[in-house]
């Protein structure tokens, strides 16, 4: 699979997924947030990515979108592993373990399309395998199986618990310097913004052969 993509397009996609708290998107601003804020932002981003992968068009004309979404899945899941490892919430820990077990259940299928599940429990992108895999095969793993549905369910529940912890004033983990850059858009407004950005990105940058 060949793609036409740029770091600018990928960064815009991540901004879209992390639209409610963009400070959680990049490594140098993540330390400004407390653990619960990170868990909330990471789980929300993962939820959006999983829904996008479920609904994505897996065709020969959509290679750039497929690649960027898979790359975002890997990066954001690893962020979620880091943030949930630090949180003092048995409910979130249990849900993250369920999510981790989901990856293990689909380990062979994921690795066949270029998503490696490492011994540490994190993901690693095998670019050469991903680019040599047909769009339809990627779609069977990320759209037509229970992998994505289970990911959507677990990340939604993690996000809800983290949101409740924030509203009750509990950081439930290690707290660092606070930031004023957290955005508080409603879920409906955020969903509309996400759809608009994705539509703009994918309609203007695709130039792909599979």
Image (cartoon, grey):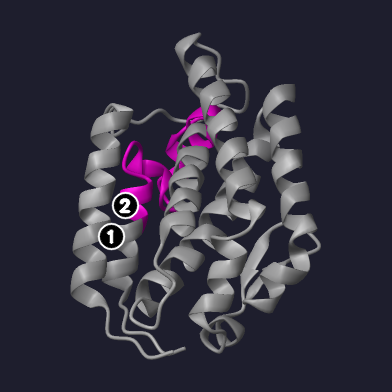
| Residue designated by label 2 | 15
Residue drawn at (59%, 37%) of the image: 153
- At a point 27% along the width and 85% down the height, the residue shown is 207
Q: How many labels sit on residues?
A: 2
> Where, quadrant-wise, is the C terminus in this rendering?
bottom left
Kindly tell me whether residue 183 is visible in this rendering: no
- Residue at x-position 54% and y-position 28%: 36
Residue 155: x percent and y percent? Answer: 57, 38
Residue 81, position in %: x, y? Answer: 65, 46
User: Whole-Å distance between the Cαs marked 1 and 2?
Assistant: 5 Å
Which residue corresponds to mark 1? 12
Q: Are marks 1 and 2 in contact (CB under 8 Å)?
A: yes
Position above or below: 176 against 15 = above
Above or below, 83 against 4 in this view is: above
Task: Locate residue 113 relative to residue 11 in the image: left or right.
Answer: right
Q: Is residue 22 magenta?
A: yes
Q: Is residue 187 left or right of residue 151?
A: left
Count residues near mark 1 (Cα–Cα under 10 Å), then give few for <14, some for 14-19, many for 20+: some
Which mark, by number, is residue 116?
none
Query: Is residue 116 highlighted in magenta?
Result: no
Residue shown at 61%/85% (left/top)?
129
Q: Is residue 55 left or right of residue 96?
A: left
Residue 208 percent across, percent down from the top left: 33, 86
- Describe the element under mark 1 as helix, strand or loop: helix
Local packing at callout 2 (Cα closer than 10 Å; few below 14, some 14-19, many 20+) is many
Q: With 30 as the anchor, is 74 left or right in this view?
A: right
Query: For the magenta stretch, what is the residue range?
Result: 14-39
Whether residue 170 is visible? yes
- State the SS at label 2: helix
């Amino acid at each position: 699979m060949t793609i036409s993509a740029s770091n600018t397009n990928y960064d815009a996609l991540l901004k879209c997924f992390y639209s409610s708290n963009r400070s959680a998107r990049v490594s140098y601003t993540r330390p400004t947030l407390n653990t619960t804020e990170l868990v909330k932002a990471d789980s929300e981003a993962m939820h959006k990515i999983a829904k996008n992968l479920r609904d994505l068009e897996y065709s020969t004309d959509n290679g750039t979108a497929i690649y960027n979404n898979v790359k975002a899945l890997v990066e954001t899941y690893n962020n979620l592993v880091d943030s949930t490892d630090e949180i003092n919430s048995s409910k979130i820990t249990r849900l993250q373990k369920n999510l981790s077990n989901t990856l293990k259940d689909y380990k062979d299928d994921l690795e066949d399309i270029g998503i490696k599940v490492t011994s540490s429990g994190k993901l690693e992108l095998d670019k050469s395998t991903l680019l040599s895999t047909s769009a339809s095969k990627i779609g069977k793993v990320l759209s037509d199986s229970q992998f994505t549905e289970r990911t959507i369910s677990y990340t939604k529940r993690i996000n809800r618990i983290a949101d409740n912890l924030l509203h009750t004033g509990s950081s439930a983990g290690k707290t660092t310097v606070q930031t004023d850059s957290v955005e508080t858009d409603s879920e409906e407004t955020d969903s509309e913004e996400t759809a608009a950005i994705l539509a703009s990105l994918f309609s203007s940058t695709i130039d792909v052969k599979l």
